Amino acid sequence: MGCFVSAEASGRFSVRLIVDGAISFAFLPFFEIASLGIVARGRERGMTFVDAVDRFFGTDTSWLLWVVAMIAIRAVESPQLATAPPQPLFWALAGSMLVPMALTARADLQLFRSTIAPSRPVRALILQRSIAWTGALVYFFGTAGWAYLVGYLS
Amino acid sequence: MAGPGRAGQALSAMLLLSAIGAGTYADRPQPRSIRIAGEFRILAADFHLHSSMWSNGTLTPWGLVLEAERHALDAIAITGHDELVDARIARRFSRWIGGPTVIVGEEIQSQSRYHMVALGVGERIDFRLPAAAAVDAIHAQAGIAIAAHPLKRFDGWDAAATKRLDAAEICHPTIYQRERAQEEFEAFAAGASAAAIGSSDFHGLGAMGACRTFVFAADNTPSAILDAIRARRTVVYGRDGTAYGDPALIPLAERARLREAAEEWRSRGGALDWWSRVAGVIGLFGLIVGGAERPASHPPLRRQQSP
């Protein structure tokens, strides 16, 4: 994420922005690990939580490749295009997130079924995603999300 | 899956390290030149930035300060969504390092009916207030009210609110997305008699300062900057280089070559930047693909446990 932030903000990889981005997005692994801690209580005997975390993050390859693809696009586009992408391009890139989302869910389901939550893998996957993503979205959108929610409800 | 192997991994790591080295070397702050026009100092400012602390930005408050130095900005306002905490942190950090002037601000998001930037306030403004009441609440704190990206679709602006405004964004990155956005900002400004503001609404994608305001202030203190906005002493360059703001100041801005300064963000950098981009992408890709093959070296747990 640090590399992604650095490339998106400046079009280059610099230590300053990589570290800053890593700090900014430290909430992502935090929520992922916290949610895994909840659903991995029924994991296989003999599997430590550290093992579970290691294997869980090992299924994120498709997300990492997606991030590299975004960085590659940023590497060739102009600063103007990066700052204000046309709406169709923006939504196409945002929509492309569905691919790693689906691939990671599939890989995680296999992992949960085999070791982390063998008794109820689908339930564990849904629970883990709900906790991690809700927490991350609430943190990331913060008070803006609250204003939108109030507006929507009223 | 056949992969690059250990040598490939080492090469990828070296490429990534060289990319970071080149990028870090190229990542130096730009010198901030002091521009004087008559009795005023001309300050380049971006009054609409979001940090990663609850305001869906990607840089920390102190990261925004450092990034502002890279874009030769003399003043910034960090405008969290309905909160002020990150702006206060950035202000303290910038004072500590002798960075750009940081004005504490907030972006009020009124249930999607209007967005307003409040500068120089000490307490949060309730986002449930109608626009005119929000302007009054900002003024009660001796702050400045700026209409943020006042596109047509924001229908919360009535005549009472626009009349009370101190300033309105006339340059915002949406003008580069759709031509009509510039027309909509111009139409809004025509009915507001407010100071012209250019703001990048920076969330971390693209360039900070892509739209910027040149403020003609007595000095670079927050109070002098706010006074200058109240007195409408600003110049902004919009799409295709059109100048907006105080007609008496536009010739001074031209003489001070502010048009060129406003284009600073369009630079794609030099050879080091290109190397950083290309080698970084290849290095990261190689490391990820190489790393993805490693599960073979981590046998399933069941097999580890079997005698």
Image: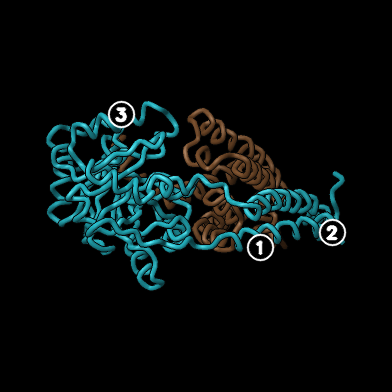
B67 and B285: which one is in front?
B67
Do badges 2 and 3 share one subunit? Answer: yes
Whether residue A119 is visible, yes or no, is no
Q: Element under label 1?
A: helix
Q: Element under label 2?
A: loop
Residue on which the image places disc 1: B21
**Picture residue at 34% right of the left edge, 65% below the top:** B91
Quadrant in which the C terminus of chain A appears? top left
Do badges 3 and 1 share one subunit? Answer: yes
Tell me which chain appears cyan: B
Give how far apart the Cα atoms at labels 1 and 2 are.
47 Å
Q: Position of residue B46 (x, y in %)?
A: 36, 51
Residue on which the image places disc 3: B184
Visual colour scheme: by chain
In the rendered image of this protein, which colour is used for chain A? brown
Give how far apart the Cα atoms at labels 3 and 1 are.
44 Å
**Picture residue at 76% right of the left edge, 50% below the top:** B286
The answer to whether the residue labelled 2 contacts the one labelled 3, judged by CB atoms less than 8 Å apart, is no
Q: Position of residue B107 (x, y in %)?
A: 30, 48
| Amino acid type of the residue tagged 2 in the rendering | Ser
| Amino acid type of the residue tagged 3 in the rendering | Glu
Q: Earlier in the sequence, mark 3 or mark 1?
A: 1
Mark 2 crowd level (few <14, some 14–19, many ≥20, 10 Å Cα): few
B158 and A130: which one is in front?
B158
The relative height of residue A140 versus residue B34 in the rendered view (above or below) is: above
Q: Earlier in the sequence, mark 2 or mark 3?
A: 3
Q: Of the numbered discs in the image, which one, if any, rests on residue A75?
A: none
Residue on which the image places disc 2: B306
Mark 3 crowd level (few <14, some 14–19, many ≥20, 10 Å Cα): some
